[in-house]
Amino acid sequence: MRIFSGNAHRALAEEIAGYVEQSLGEVIITRFPDGEVWVKIVDNIRGQDVFIVQPTCYPPNENLMELLIMIDAARRASAARITAVMPFYGYARQDRKDQPRVPITAKLVANLLVAAGANRLLAMDFHAQQVQGFFDIPVDHLFAAPVLVKHLRAKQIPNLVVVAPDPGGLKMAYAYSNMLEAGLAIVAKQRRSATEVEALNLVGDVKGCNAVLVDDLCTTGGTLCAAANLLKERGTQRIFAAVTHAVLTNQAIDRLRDSPIEGMVTTNSVPAKDWRGFPVEVLSVADLLGEAILRIHSNQSVTSLFNI
Ligand code: R5P
């Protein structure tokens, strides 16, 4: 078995390799002067079980292209099996045709990965679980919940309500509320543009409660901040956020700092940022991914990785 990393998040790949008690495989990734990506896998990987770690976070197109080219290089180097390890699957939100003449880019990315030569995918907290169906190769889809819920439980926040900041997040919020034995509420949101979100209404009892907003992803912070403002209006006391993938823009950090959200807990599925004073706790999912890699390699079940 060999584990390789692209440039997207080498620190996470190193942590995963450490868990598996390996060092990362040697690969050269450079750019030609015109920006084209060039890859050379230095190690001999003939007949090997190859795992390539590359979340397609910012800059998504560069990171995706690197991943595709690394997969192609591994295939042409006669790897026995190639698993794309994508702790964050960029483009996952574009998973349906919700207006005329728009693409389904999450499916296009799936097609590209398979066309490049990926035999399996290991991913975590897709925007929607149905994205698994875009692949006709095996997909191991992990949840960050075992890591995040353990942390939230340890905080022992009294009178807790878990809040989905939009209807799409209801399933995730419901699972968290069960695991935390907390109440459940849901915000109805309307997205006005890529950066502007309006929280229209709230269903659930939040008055006097402490809330944790849970979401798969935060990018501009519009969704979380709109929901938090509405929660405050409805009499919620303290508000926290738990987000698997903190792909935060600078605007998001400013918004979060100015919002009623006291702090966020997230994972290292994408590289950490300078949070500029906004309290963020980053939990590692390297062991979870490392254990999944070990189990995939030895054809064992990964079911126990979902246990809390
Ligand atoms: C949307 O359905 C997702 O689950 C997130 O709520 C959303 O993508 C977050 O984006 P932003 O932070 O830009 O509002």
Image (cartoon, helix red, strand yellow):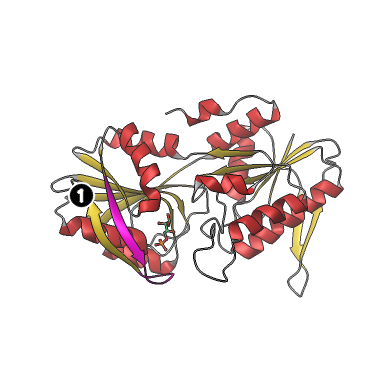
Q: Which residues are magenta?
A: 185-196
Where does label 1 land, which residue? 238
Q: Quadrant of ligand 1?
A: bottom left
Residue name at image x 68 percent, y 26 percent: 299
Taking the spot 52% from the left edge, 52% from the top edge, the residue there is 270
The image shows residue 20 at horizontal and vertical percentages of 64, 32
User: What residue is at 42 percent from the left and 67 percent from the top?
Assistant: 250
Q: Is residue 272 visible?
A: yes
Question: What amino acid is found at the position of numbered circle 1 in the picture?
Answer: Arg
Residue 151 inside the magenta-drawn segment: no
Q: Nearer the viewer, residue 122 or 278?
A: 122
Q: Is residue 255 above or below residue 262?
A: below
Q: Is residue 87 left or right of residue 217?
A: right
Image position, residue 224 (x, y; %): 33, 58
Image quadrant holding the C terminus, namely: top left
Q: Residues within 10 Å of mark 1 (few under 14, many from 20)?
A: some
The residue closer to the viewer here, 86 or 139, is: 139
Q: Residue furthest bottom?
A: 34
Quarter of the image with the N terminus is top right
- Verify whether residue 191 appears in magenta: yes
Choose between 68 and 13: the one closer to the eye.
68
Residue 260 visible in the snapshot: no
> On the picture, is 107 further left or further right than 186?
right
